[in-house]
Image (spheres, helix red, strand yellow):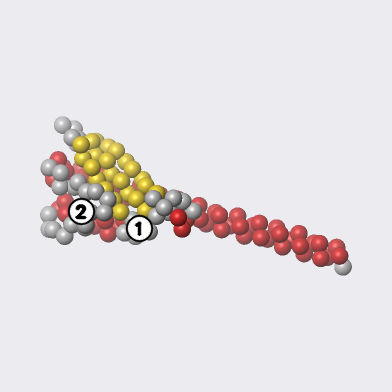
Amino acid sequence: MIEVLVAVVVLSLGALGVAGMQAAGMRSNHSSFYRATAAELVHDMADRMRVNRAAARSGLYNRALGDPVPTGTTLAERDLAEWLARIAALPSGDGSIAIDNSRVTITVSWDDRRAGGDANATFVMSTEVWVN
């Protein structure tokens, strides 16, 4: 009888360990999903700016974190509004764009605590959108 009890205890501990590893794997997978989504969104905005170079050069895509969502009808304003709507799918998602000459830095930030990451997780890409 004691052997059966010991076997049940050992089996239970093993099952708890497997459940813990499963939960950790799911958190890691969710965090990876957020990061992949952020990377795709950053590349999406870089492509949108390459299509609308004149507006990008004139600074119409510049945006700081926390700025209001644009509501205008220009292509740049619609691009930003659509991009920010997609970023809003991330927990506390927000994005910024800084243009310095032809160098563009695009940032997507989100709260990754639920997936086991940082409260202010970010994905930043710096690229040349056009050549002067």
The quarter of the rendered structure image containing the C terminus is top left
Please indicate whether residue 23 sits to the left or right of residue 5 in the image.
left
Q: Nearer the viewer, residue 55 or 2?
A: 2
Residue labelled with disc 1 = 92
| Label 2 with label 1: CB-CB less than 8 Å | no
Does the image show residue 50? yes
From this viewpoint, which residue is outermost toward the right? 1
**Three-letter residue code for mark 2:** Asp
In the rendered structure, which disc, 2 or 1, sits on the residue that comes first in sequence?
2
User: Measuring 15% from the left and 47% from the top, which residue is drawn there?
Assistant: 60
Quadrant of the frame with the N terminus: bottom right
Which secondary structure, mark 1?
loop
Front tag of 2 and 1? 1
SS at badge 2 = helix
Query: Looking at the image, which residue is at 39% across and 49% down?
Result: 121
Q: CA distance from mark 2 to mark 1?
A: 20 Å
Q: Which mark is residue 53?
A: none
What amino acid type should be assigned to the residue bearing mark 1?
Ser
